[in-house]
Image (cartoon, rainbow, N blue to C red):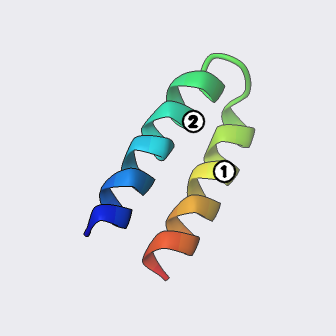
């Protein structure tokens, strides 16, 4: 459970940092993080 919470925090930070810069990059990173944490 702790790992899941951390992954969400990292995802949120990545979204905030990459959203204004490049949408495709933050989307790919988000999917990769979700895949590694959920799957």
Q: Quadrant of residue 3?
A: bottom left
Direction bottom: furthest residue? 39
User: Where residue 29 is drawn, which disc sits there?
Assistant: 1
- Between 23 and 33, which is closer to the camera in this rendering? 33
**Residue 12, above or below 3:** above
Mark 2 Cα-neighbour bin, 10 Å: few <14, some 14–19, many ≥20: some
**Mark 1 element type:** helix
The span from disc 2 to disc 1 (Cα, nearest Å) is 8 Å
Image position, residue 11 (x, y; %): 49, 45
Image position, residue 6 (x, y; %): 39, 52
The residue sitting at 57% across, 73% down in the picture is: 36
The residue sitting at 49% across, 44% down in the picture is: 10
Direction front: furthest residue? 2
Image position, residue 27 (x, y; %): 62, 46
User: Where residue 14 is drawn, which disc sits there?
Assistant: 2
Mark 2 or 1, nearer chain start:
2
- Between 2 and 38, which is closer to the camera in this rendering? 2
Mark 1 Cα-neighbour bin, 10 Å: few <14, some 14–19, many ≥20: some
The residue sitting at 29% across, 63% down in the picture is: 2
**Mark 2 element type:** helix
**Residue 20, above or below 13:** above
Q: Are marks 2 and 1 in contact (CB under 8 Å)?
A: yes
Q: Quadrant of residue 22?
A: top right
**Residue 29, above or below 21:** below
Direction top: furthest residue? 20
Image position, residue 38 (x, y; %): 43, 76
């Amino acid at each position: 459970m702790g790992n899941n919470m951390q992954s969400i925090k990292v995802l949120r930070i990545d979204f905030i940092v990459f959203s204004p810069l490049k949408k495709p990059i933050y989307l790919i990173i988000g999917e990769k993080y979700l895949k590694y944490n959920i799957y």
